[in-house]
Amino acid sequence: MMASLLSFLLAFHLTVIMSSSLTTTSEVFSEQSLAKPVEKLTQLHFYFHDNLTSKNPTAMQIVGPPKGSTGGFGAIFMMDDPLTEGPSPSSKLIGKSQGMYAIASQHEFGLLMVLNFVFIEGVYNGSTLSILGRNVVMEKVREMPVVGGSGVFRFARGSALAKTYMFNTTSGVAIVEYNVSVMHV
């Protein structure tokens, strides 16, 4: 009986050792799925408030234009601008536009925009949309691509249309209306 118990314990011990040496985590670099996720189209409408000069500016220049620059070419600005439901700065806050823009054209007021719309309201709370594109400010409507997103907007792609609602060159205040169409899963 002792020999059979010893044999059983030895066999059990060997089984445990052998099974613990087997890999339980996947070492597969990538996997593909044939299942196509269901995509949704979401339309968003809000206002962006950029303020360079108040007591509490929402954007500021972090790099000045180089000497001899035309029209501010080369200047870079960092922003943390409010996004609101309506054009009034006191309208309901729905998020922030965080990122940077640079004067990227020597011949027109053309900006390179690199920004994230960070939403804090409703089902979009904690979700973001990433925008990367050219913004020729003096054009009536500018189109910039949505290149990604997170949260509700995971796998986002789409288009952001910007239209200047108000721009005061003296005060450095701009209010821009955004209509965003975004596809996401």
Image (cartoon, grey):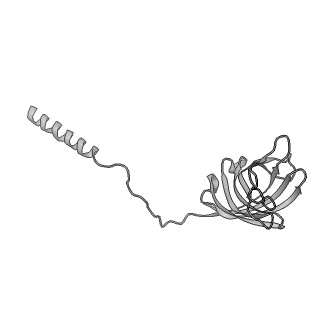
Q: Residue at x 81, y 44 (%)?
A: 57
Q: Residue at x 69, y 47 (%)?
A: 125
- Quadrant location, the C terminus: bottom right
Q: Quadrant of residue 56?
A: top right
Return the x and y of residue 59 as percentages of the image width and height: 78, 48
Q: Is residue 1 visible?
A: no
Q: Nearer the viewer, residue 45 or 169?
A: 169
Q: Nearer the viewer, residue 99 or 40?
A: 99
Return the x and y of residue 65 as percentages of the image width and height: 76, 55
Q: Nearer the viewer, residue 121 or 6?
A: 121
**How many discs appear?**
0
Q: Nearer the viewer, residue 51 or 161?
A: 51
Q: Residue at x 72, y 48 (%)?
A: 122
- Quadrant location, the N terminus: top left
Q: Residue at x 75, y 66 (%)?
A: 143
Return the x and y of residue 83 as percentages of the image width and height: 78, 51
Q: Please, which residue is most extreme toward the top here? A: 2
The reply, left or right, for residue 63 in relation to residue 170 is left
Relative to 54, does residue 134 appear above or below in the rendering? below
Q: Is residue 16 visible?
A: yes
Q: Please, which residue is most extreme toward the front here? A: 68
